[in-house]
Amino acid sequence: MLINRTALATLERLARAYPVVAICGPRQSGKTTLSQLFQPEYRYVSLEDPDTLAFAETDPRGFLEQFANGGIIDEIQREPKLLSYIQGIVDKKKQMGQFILTGSQQFGLLSKISQSLAGRVGIIDLLPFSINELIDAKQDRNLLEQIFQGFYPPVYDRHLDPVMWYADYSRTYIERDVRQLIQVEKLSDFQRFMRLCAARTGQLIQYADLARDADLDYRTVKSWLSILEASYIIFFLNPYFKNYSKRLVKQPKLYFYDTGLVCRLLNIKSVDELDISVFKGALFETMMISDAKKISDHLRLENNFFFWRDNKKIEIDLVMESEAGLTLLELKSSKTVQPEFFHSLQAVKTYLQSSQQLVAGSYLVYGGEDQQSRQGCEVIAWKNYAKNLGWF
């Protein structure tokens, strides 16, 4: 079953404005499917194929002659030297949307694209499915099932067992990508490191603690985290700094893009295990914040994402900055709304207003289904938050 991607409209818009569009994202996020859906008549090649890669390496001009009528080149990071040759072609032909490039690693790829194709390329990050995409396709699940199953397309397209698929995905990622990027003496060390990161999703990143628990030096921890980030496995959320006093924390928070992968790394093997897991709240927070990031990236919204936390333990899970002001979202997996859920929202909202900062809205996103207004905040169900924010 083909599930429509929100990013398709963005891809179409970029292809009308640029001769080259680059679709970046993790492996198996649907980059190839999206590019072929957009231009089914374009010639398609993948640089994962050894013969194709050898052709591109030894005869780049001859290789690119295949795409006189437009082309899709998959996994462009395998031969970034092609980018300079593509620049000459698009400058001469001046055809919008002539090349669609895909890549699975940010590590050095975006800088190479920006250097070689400055002003000629539109870039879009394609992440796994969003909640709204699954709802529209009638493939959504209840809360715990959704967290457990995750959002990667193959789990839905091929109706695969998420436990088995994520185990294979993790193993394949380590064997194929990590070995290309860093020297790992023992793959078991990196596997343990990923599990330790999974246990920290939604938490402030403490590099020294992570290094101690992983039995690694500080520099290696920083390097391996950058590899996970470059491969679209994790991302970092920074605190909101504008007009901050020194009372507020400065460390970023660590999040995974996909909760299904986190469940596998934490050895959570069923929905029942998830329901009693100490990680349930962190996984709900991870799902919602990564979902907001997916939608923002796919629609190219001008949103900046932060969190709020001070030394008095006043915390807001997600602060979104846009031209309309700051939008505050507190995230609770509970299906029952409790009065104390509003304390941080009210405290931060009062502080921002007193410092003359514009608050566009304050929301409690929870694991239930009802919508209501309480204590000056909007209470919205987790499945409906994007529509309540006006994104759809």
Image: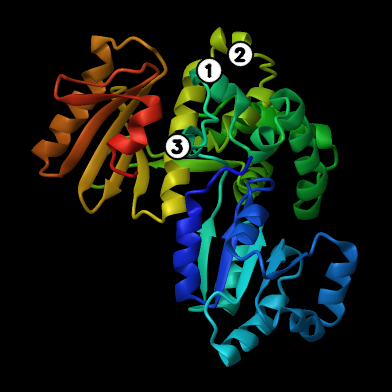
Res 76 label: none
Res 271 label: 2
Q: Can residue 253 be seen in this view?
A: no
Q: Which residue appears farthest toward the right when viewing the image?
A: 51
Precedes in sequence: disc 2 or disc 3: 3
Q: Kindly identify the amino acid type of the residue bearing the numbered disc 1.
A: Leu
The residue that label 3 is drawn on is 132
Quarter where residue 93 is shown: bottom right
Mark 3 vs mark 1, foreground winner is 3
How far across and down, in percent of the image, does residue 262 sit? 62, 28
Q: Kindly identify the amino acid type of the residue bearing the numbered disc 3.
A: Asn
Tag 1–tag 2 contact (CB < 8 Å): yes
How far across and down, in percent of the image, does residue 132 sit? 45, 37
Cα separation between marks 1 and 2: 6 Å
Could you tell me which secondary element the residue under label 1 belongs to? helix
Which residue is located at x 20 percent, y 47 percent?
Answer: 325
Q: In this view, does 95 lie above or below 271?
A: below
Tag 3–tag 1 contact (CB < 8 Å): no
Could you tell me which secondary element the residue under label 2 belongs to? helix
Q: Is residue 35 visible?
A: yes
Tag 2–tag 3 contact (CB < 8 Å): no
How far across and down, in percent of the image, does residue 230 sit? 62, 51
- Judged left or right of residue 390, residue 145 is right
Cα separation between marks 3 and 1: 16 Å
Which residue is located at x 88 percent, y 71 percent?
Answer: 54
Res 144 label: 1
